[in-house]
Image: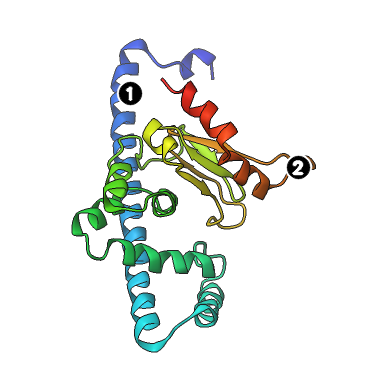
């Protein structure tokens, strides 16, 4: 077959581009739908665990047992470490009395939800982060990547001044999270320092004051 046969005629490029746009819109819609179902599942599990903890005294040992049961029943499943199950409980308890935020929280990724729960202490702060346009649910295409052991510092001036910093320890083994470009990611260098030192260093006045002054 001649190589010319594989070339796309210029008048077809625009037409094919429109088809690609249809595919991308469908892919994004599917991704959003899957994400909403995942967050809804975590909500229901969190509600169940919360009620069991309140009414029947469920604690760490029972949750660890439940985690092992799920991972044995669904071999290779992600997201059901004991720590993440406790996050589901926290997620439900954080938004159970705020219908508006509980609805919005289903539109962002689980890793971003966990970051917000760690960084924000009031409903006003949570709403601010939840409604940030940079929290777009889509396959990774940019933004700050982070993994367990990293420290994330808010880049937005008011949050930076208020000391909004989080230590990442909620991801599964080998999992990489990503989020807004409004985060600065700090990472320890192997054989030089450790993750705890970097976290505490990021909160020191010497570091934070310089960062605040550099904001525009």
**Mark 2 residue crowding within 10 angstroms, few (<14) / some (14–19) / many (20+):** few
Q: Position of residue 29 (x, y in %)?
A: 29, 44
Residue 213 falls left or right of residue 200: left
Which numbered dot is residue 161?
A: none
Q: Which residue ends up furthest to the left in the rendered image?
A: 100
Residue at the (38%, 40%) spot, across then down: 138
Question: What kind of element bears circle 2?
Answer: loop
Is residue 179 depicted above or below 123 in this figure? above
Contact flag, marks 1 and 2 (Cβ < 8 Å): no
Which numbered dot is residue 190?
A: 2
For disc 1, the marked residue is: 17
Mark 1 and mark 2 lie on one chain; the one further toward the N terminus is: 1
Q: Which quarter shows the C terminus? A: top left
Q: Position of residue 203 (x, y in %)?
A: 55, 41
Residue 162 falls left or right of residue 106: right
Of the residues tagged 1 and 2, which is closer to the observer?
2
Picture mark count:
2
């Amino acid at each position: 077959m001649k190589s010319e046969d594989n070339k796309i005629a210029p008048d077809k490029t625009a037409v094919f581009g429109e088809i690609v746009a249809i595919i991308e819109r469908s892919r994004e819609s599917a991704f959003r739908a899957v994400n909403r179902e995942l967050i809804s599942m975590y909500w229901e599990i969190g509600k169940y665990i919360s009620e069991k903890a309140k009414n029947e005294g469920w604690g760490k040992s029972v949750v660890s047992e439940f985690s092992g049961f799920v991972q044995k029943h669904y071999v290779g499943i992600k997201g059901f470490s004991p720590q993440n199950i406790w996050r589901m409980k926290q997620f439900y308890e954080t938004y159970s009395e705020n219908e508006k935020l509980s609805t919005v929280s289903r539109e962002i990724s689980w890793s971003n939800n966990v970051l917000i729960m760690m960084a924000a202490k009031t409903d006003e702060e949570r709403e601010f982060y939840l409604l940030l346009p940079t929290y777009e649910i889509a396959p990774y295409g940019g933004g700050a990547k982070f993994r367990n052991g990293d420290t994330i510092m808010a880049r937005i001036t008011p949050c930076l001044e208020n000391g909004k910093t989080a230590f990442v320890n909620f991801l599964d083994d080998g999992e990489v999270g990503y989020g807004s470009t409004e985060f600065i990611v700090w990472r320890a260098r192997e054989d030089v320092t450790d993750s705890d030192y970097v976290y505490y260093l990021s909160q020191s006045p010497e570091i934070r004051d310089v960062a605040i002054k550099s904001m525009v």
